[in-house]
Image: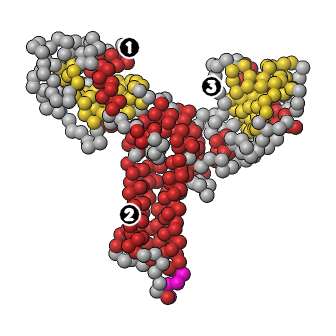
Amino acid sequence: MPTDHDIIVAPATAPGGAIAVVRISGAGAATLCDRIFRGRTALATAPGYSVHYGRVVDGDRTVDDVLATLFRAPHSYTGEDSVELSCHGSPYIVSEVLRLLRAAGARMAEPGEFTIRAYLAGKLDLAQAEAVADLIASSSRAAHALASAQLRGGYSAALDGLRDRLLELVALLELELDFSEEDVEFADRGQLRETMERIRGEIDRLHDSFRLGNAIKEGVAVALVGAPNVGKSTLLNRLLGEERAMVSEIAGTTRDVIEECIDIDGVRFRFLDTAGIRATDDRLERMGIERTLAGIERARIVVRLVDAAIAPIPPIEFALRADQTLLTVVNKTDIAAPACALPNGAIGISARRGDGIDRLRSALRAAVDTESLYHGDPIVSNSRHCAALDDARRALDGALAALRDELPTDLLSEELRHTVRSLGAITARGAIAPDEVLKHIFSKFCIGK
């Protein structure tokens, strides 16, 4: 990971727009920019939070008219002196501005290096830094709200609150160790257990929220399953509003899992159009059915499509987990004869004509409870955080077992310290995370952020 204090530069906007922003950061960034920027006022002597109109020049040649926005340390994103040059979005102009800045002494930033500097300067903790990448990648209102809440620090504050309460317990136990010869007990064991169990419950809630948080971040997986030729591909095309999945009257047409994404009322859903489940000797079709079962396993919602002409509805051919939602959808209600009676809770549709699709959309959206998200409750969406919470749970369970078995105070204290370290690894507040952790996190960032 880069830890030098070079002046770094990178485009901060995606190519193809009418306007591009080139970001420069590091001690002396304004002075460096003055080597290629010509305005009324030299940037090196200008106050922070000011915008200056001028030109980027290469000797006597004007490259572009630009706006230079100046930020002074420590009140900038990186905590360093920073300049953002807003120029026209021509790839040639951007490349020329970058070339001139590199020639003036800057170097190209590595992926996520601006945010690394913000983290190292204490402007963000590690969880907030990860939220920056999630915010950039957010593809729905719910994913945006999740990343925004984490970036604002509410999630970190909840973790810090748990750590502070655990540290208070550790301090009392350490005090007992200091006075071990006097056989005094500073931490009442009943109150200690009650506090630890309450913290364990809060860690459980955070850990369990990962299912929802990860689904919102990655897209809620919905498996469309049912017998061959029941209309799964037709339904997917209807939901998408375009022909994406191949439709045929020949049963077994879909041999592989087809994945497409749809936004429904601010939540991104990933639909998996699967191969029909039936007994078959066709080797390729069997492989498709195996992938169907794997798709069901990773889905949060399973839409079981059945034919309205078939009565009674056949039994389910697969097992569901307790955390999965099953929606029974009866298709082809427009051609069923005689008129079919829908099972309790089932949704009747015609994928071909579009009847009942709005009701299905509403049922899908209702299956994802985002109330806690929009009320600002801390929700875990990062697998690294989930693993750290799992480690904290195990350590706290060890502390509770030590308390139950009346083990020595030093063993109890060490288990609590392990819990504190596990929670602290999520934000790395008060300590710098190991280089391998930083490299893993920031390698996923785009250049310029």
Residue 116 location in percent, x, y? Answer: 64, 44
Occupied quadrant, residue 322: top left
- In magenta, the rendered stretch is 177-181
Residue 435 as seen in the image, left or right of residue 269: right
Disc 2: which residue: 197
Under circle 2, the secondary element is: helix
Spot occupied by residue 4 in the image (x, y as percentages of width and height): 73, 47
Between disc 1 and disc 2, the foreground one is 2
Earlier residue among tags 1 and 2: 2
Q: Which residue is mark 3?
A: 14
- Report the amino acid beneath label 1: Glu
Q: Amino acid at mark 3?
A: Ala
Crowding at dot 1, Cα within 10 Å, few <14 / some 14-19 / many 20+, comes out as few
Can I make out residue 175 in this image? Answer: yes
Q: Residue at x 42, y 70 (%)?
A: 192
Q: CA distance from mark 1 to mark 2?
A: 52 Å
Residue 323: where, in percent of width, then height? 29, 42
Residue 179 lies in magenta, yes or no? yes
136 magenta-colored = no
Q: Tell me the residue at 54%/52% (across/down).
A: 157
**Secondary structure predominantly adopted by residues drawn in magenta:** helix
User: Which residue is the extreme one toward the front?
Assistant: 375
Q: Are marks 3 and 1 in contact (CB under 8 Å)?
A: no
Given the image, on which type of amino acid does mark 2 rest? Glu
Q: Position of residue 435 (x, y in %)?
A: 60, 51
User: In the rendered image, which quarter contains the C terminus?
Assistant: top right
Counting the numbered discs, the total is 3
Query: In this figure, which residue is indicated by the disc labeled 1?
Result: 242
Instruction: Answer with mark 2 or mark 3, whichever residue precedes in sequence.
Output: 3
